[in-house]
Amino acid sequence: MTCEVAVMNKRGIALAADSAVTVRDGDGARKKIYYTAEKLFSLSPDLPVAIMTYGPADIMGVPWETVVKVYAQKLDGRRFDTLAGYARDFLAFIEGATWLFSPEIQTQWVRSLAHSVWDGLYKDKLDEALADLSRPTPRQALARLAAIIEEDQEDWAGYPDLGCVAPDYGRHVQESYAEVLDEVAELVFEGLPLTADIKAALRHTAGLTYQKDWFHPRDRSRIVIAGMGEAEPFPVLLEYDVGTLAAGTLRYKKTDETRVGGDVDASVASFAQDDIIHSIIQGVHPRVYREFVEAAARLDDPDGEEESEEIREREQRLAALVRKEILRPYADPLLSAVSALPRQDLAKMAESLVNLTAFLMRMTVDEDETVSEPVDVALLSKGDGFIWVKHKDVRALAHA
């Protein structure tokens, strides 16, 4: 886990990121937490643009630190009118970096993703479906597997296509990696005589995983691009989910956008481990808020046995009422104060929010210390570009 914060007003934007990173083995079991991770990066001291990463520390085995720093070198003084221009150029750089993400590496990740999806979904469901049969025959197993795949593909129909890929991208992936996908199918369903129809259905599922707006946890990183383009006077913050490359195409999706200007004088945004920061900004812990809304909506059903459309609608009305009458009135005075802060105080606030999260996690005995000092802090402004306020490398050199 990690904790990152962006505090913005019309004077600039302060970014802060902790240094903890969790290293896991291939099965997902945690191995060790290190406290030297780089998560906040400058593209150039002259540019008021920065990139933060959270989630996996790498993309397809290449550290995000390497990707961002190589891109900063390739940028070579180019400037864009909007922050979205930098974002598009950065994502296009990743897609075109075949020397980092070779076709062979892309094939390996297609293989890995297909194995994870089929083993964690189809194989597990098949084992459950056959558990009530004392000695299931291959024909019975194949029939149940076909039914499981068909049901799952009906669910896939409810997902929209990912906006960054061509309409036939999924089909292109399944055709480009047909042989590899068939090999994975034989491995996952070892001992089961898969028919040509089932193999084709599995390949179709693989195509859907790349075509649809869906990211597997092993396939997704999150990045934040913050700052100002040449034609943008005030800060902008863009969030993206970024997947992996297959058949030369990068999957990604913009998940949020925050802008200062107009009616918005200030904003405080937090990423990853953000419950504590939401508690400070809104005055109530998100978990307490959710549990209160759910409990209040079920006052007539204290045992929670009823699950109806009426209760869901009641929860939505209560949530909207709490946001309007409690959360917003609590948060608005704080945001008004943020709008008046000088840039150095923006940096102090961002750093303090990350430090407080790290402190409270250290004091919580039933959670791992996955947010930790040192905290890197940067200031971005139209006049001064990118300035490090605090950085672990600078501190290390100062004490050497």
Image (tube, helix red, strand yellow):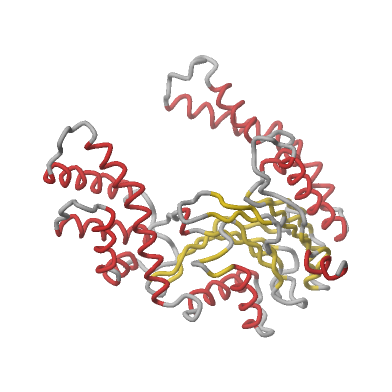
Location of residue 201 by image quarter:
bottom left
Residue at the location (87% across, 55% down)?
345
**Quick check: 347 left or right of 322?**
right
Location of residue 104 by image quarter:
bottom left
Residue at the location (26% across, 44% down)?
151
Location of residue 233 by image quarter:
bottom right
| Residue 2 point in image, percent of width and height | 65, 52
State the residue in front, 213 or 17: 17
**Quick check: 175 left or right of 134?**
right
**Quick check: 382 left or right of 82?**
right
Above or below for 282 versus 57:
above
| Residue 132 point in image, percent of width and height | 21, 31
Above or below for 138 versus 204:
above
In which quadrant of the rendered image does the C terminus lie?
bottom right
| Residue 270 point in image, percent of width and height | 68, 50
Above or below for 121 versus 162:
above
Q: How many marks?
A: 0
